[in-house]
Image (cartoon, rainbow, N blue to C red):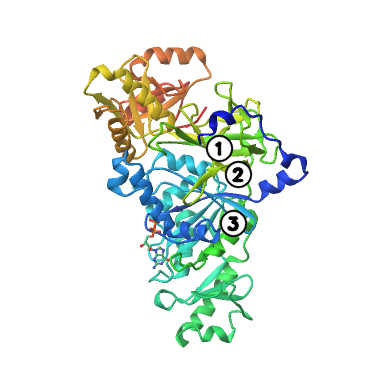
């Protein structure tokens, strides 16, 4: 990192990729950017470890957890992370497998849902949904799935823990179809479960893969092959064959188009702990998951394979290194090729900055990214210059759409015990709003700001950081509102009138956009009824 100062003076490196026709397109087409969505305990961490193992990113299983622990001791500024043993931050892991570059974005594992979770899911092209075979679909799975559905993100399903007591596979498929309104296409069918779990039968090309054995498996003639009789109790074989013919008929063959449109999910069964079925998932990502998508901007659609680099900041993380006040901005490269040292325009301010030290993150390390392509996620160290939603380009003024803010339901005022430090509090809140830790609403009448969050744990993080990092003794107080709504109107005169009339319940967010601070849900609906000329929104796209 310390090379930064000199590197900034160097001209951008030559771009050999652009010299070779097709190289850029090839590099982009072999990228897969995805997340794992799961209810806590379903096996997300275990699966992540095993995926990285295949990618050669780590040598030993157990290191993701180990890394978690290390991060906890390192970031001791954040007592909350330590005390609850959780990772409050979203990170990215880049790895390669079979000539494919994967960017795995980690969704935070804590009890509460947060703005980070939403934003992370806006930066992926597909997701693996992990379901515990005994528990089926759980509340968090459902919630995360709903966010994926907002953008029709293609989902690959992994039914995990088949080596333990499990529900009937058919019931699990039925639950997915009914609860999520998502068609299923089983790709493999389990042979036994619990202690008698022997492996899976591949429904497309008849083949059996055995647990704890060579993953290539053994070709068979079909579900009637006598080998299958040797794997199960005699009374189980008949029903198993009936089931297989049923799922083959009912689900038909996997439909790539429906998967890409987010209406059908291929389903795999396995055991992350026993490293079984994990390779199926990587192969599915390689074969079926979409390469980097095109990204909508206000004026046009930016295509991933365009020559010119564009990127969007979707996450900011502070205190990655407790010795520095740097903030890491996570950027998804939306198009073209990034080279280290290149000069880019920060569209919001019009200023030029050099990408001197863009970084890739691996399981345990990070390294300078000499080059990156559309779909890749890189960290850009900066000192509070970058904000969520920012676009970085080679000069074009682009405003990307689609990183949403959701109206927070948890709203508070902050009481400062030491009034002399009001200015410091103001700055701290602004910084943390820019990082996306909280949403900040400044009332137009000049009264005290209101902070809002999606998940209650975000409040704890905010309180903790204000105390530990900024040395501000604060307490939370009730806010004078129950919920907020962004509002606008095509009728400038009507808007002006509304602003005057409701002055005491109107605030501005970080971008200066107006929100209505509704004292109650009832008040909100009656105000909406009284003012049909004003449009109220509970979601706002950043910028
Ligand atoms: P996360 O909370 O979703 O990250 O879940 P973890 O990966 O930490 O797993 C939760 C627990 O389930 C741990 O004790 C794992 O060892 C266990 N586990 C994960 N996958 C499997 C599996 O395939 N079979 C069995 N028997 N246990 C598993």
Establish if 479 lies above or below 33. Answer: above
Q: Circle 2 sits in a helix, a strand or a loop, which is it?
A: loop
| Percent coordinates x, y for residue 256 in the rendering | 64, 57
- Residues under numbered marks 3 and 2 in contact, where contact means CB atoms less than 8 Å apart: no
Residue 525 visible in the displayed image: no
- Say whether disc 3 or disc 2 marks the residue closer to the N-terminus: 3
Label 2 packing within 10 angstroms: few (<14), some (14-19), many (20+): many
Q: Which residue does the numbered mark 2 point to in the structure image? A: 375
- Say whether disc 3 or disc 1 marks the residue closer to the N-terminus: 3
Q: Which residue does the numbered mark 3 point to in the structure image? A: 285
Say which of marks 1 and 2 sits in front. Answer: 1
Of 92 and 203, nearer the camera is 92
- Compute the Cα span from label 1 to label 2: 15 Å
| Percent coordinates x, y for residue 38 in the rendering | 43, 54
- Image quadrant where residue 74 sits: top left
| Percent coordinates x, y for residue 511 in the rendering | 47, 23
Q: Which residue does the numbered mark 1 point to in the structure image? A: 358
Q: Residue at x 29, y 19 (%)?
A: 422
Label 1 packing within 10 angstroms: few (<14), some (14-19), many (20+): many
- Compute the Cα span from label 3 to label 2: 14 Å
Q: Is residue 116 left or right of residue 56?
A: left
Q: Circle 3 sits in a helix, a strand or a loop, which is it?
A: helix
Say which of marks 3 and 2 sits in front. Answer: 2
């Amino acid at each position: 990192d310390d090379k930064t100062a000199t590197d900034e003076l160097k001209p951008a490196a030559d771009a050999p990729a652009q010299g070779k026709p097709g190289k850029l397109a090839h590099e982009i087409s072999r990228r897969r950017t995805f997340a794992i969505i799961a209810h806590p305990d379903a096996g997300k961490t275990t699966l992540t470890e095993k995926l990285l193992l295949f990618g050669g990113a780590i040598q030993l299983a157990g290191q993701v957890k180990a890394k978690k622990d290390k991060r906890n001791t390192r970031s001791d500024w954040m007592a909350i992370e330590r005390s609850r043993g959780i990772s409050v931050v979203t990170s990215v892991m880049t790895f390669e497998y079979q000539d494919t570059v994967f960017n795995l974005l980690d969704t935070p594992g804590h009890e509460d849902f947060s703005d980070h979770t939403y934003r992370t899911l806006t930066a992926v092209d597909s997701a693996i949904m992990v379901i515990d075979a005994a528990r089926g679909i759980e509340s968090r799975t459902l919630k995360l799935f709903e966010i994926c559905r907002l953008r029709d993100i293609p989902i690959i399903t992994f039914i995990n823990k088949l080596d333990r007591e499990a529900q009937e596979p058919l019931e699990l498929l039925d639950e997915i179809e009914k609860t999520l309104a998502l068609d299923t296409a089983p790709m493999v069918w389990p042979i036994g479960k619990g202690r008698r779990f022997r492996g899976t039968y591949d429904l497309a090309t008849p083949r059996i893969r055995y647990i704890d054995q060579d993953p290539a498996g053994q070709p068979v003639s079909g579900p009637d092959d006598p080998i299958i009789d040797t794997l199960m109790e005699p009374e189980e074989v008949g029903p198993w064959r009936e089931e297989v013919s049923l799922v083959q008929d009912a689900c038909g063959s996997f439909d790539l188009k429906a998967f890409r449109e987010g209406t059908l999910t291929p389903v795999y069964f396995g055991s992350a702990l026993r490293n079984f079925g994990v390779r199926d998932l990587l192969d599915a990502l390689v074969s079926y998951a979409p390469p980097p998508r095109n990204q909508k901007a206000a004026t046009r659609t930016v295509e991933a394979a365009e020559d010119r680099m564009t990127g969007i900041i979707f996450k900011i993380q502070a205190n990655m290194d407790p010795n520095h006040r740097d903030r890491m901005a996570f950027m998804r490269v939306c198009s073209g090729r990034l080279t280290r040292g290149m000069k880019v325009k920060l569209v919001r301010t019009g200023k030029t900055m050099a990408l001197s030290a863009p970084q890739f993150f691996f399981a345990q390390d990070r390294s300078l990214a000499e080059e990156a392509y559309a779909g890749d996620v890189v960290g850009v160290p900066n000192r509070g210059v970058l904000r969520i939603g920012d676009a970085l380009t080679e000069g074009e003024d682009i405003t990307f759409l689609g990183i949403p803010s959701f109206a927070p339901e948890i709203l508070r005022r902050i009481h400062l015990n030491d009034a002399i430090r009001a200015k410091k509090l103001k700055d701290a809140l602004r910084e943390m709003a820019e990082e996306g830790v909280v949403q900040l609403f400044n009332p137009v009448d000049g009264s005290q700001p209101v902070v809002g969050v999606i998940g209650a744990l975000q409040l704890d993080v905010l309180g903790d950081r204000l105390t530990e990092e900024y040395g501000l003794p604060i307490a939370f107080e009730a806010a004078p509102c129950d919920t907020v709504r962004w509002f606008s109107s095509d009728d400038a005169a009507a808007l002006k009138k509304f602003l005057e009339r409701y002055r005491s319940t109107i605030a501005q967010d970080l971008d200066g956009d107006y929100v209505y601070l509704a004292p109650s849900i009832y008040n909100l609906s009656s105000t909406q009824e009284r003012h049909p000329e004003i449009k109220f929104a509970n979601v706002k796209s950043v910028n």
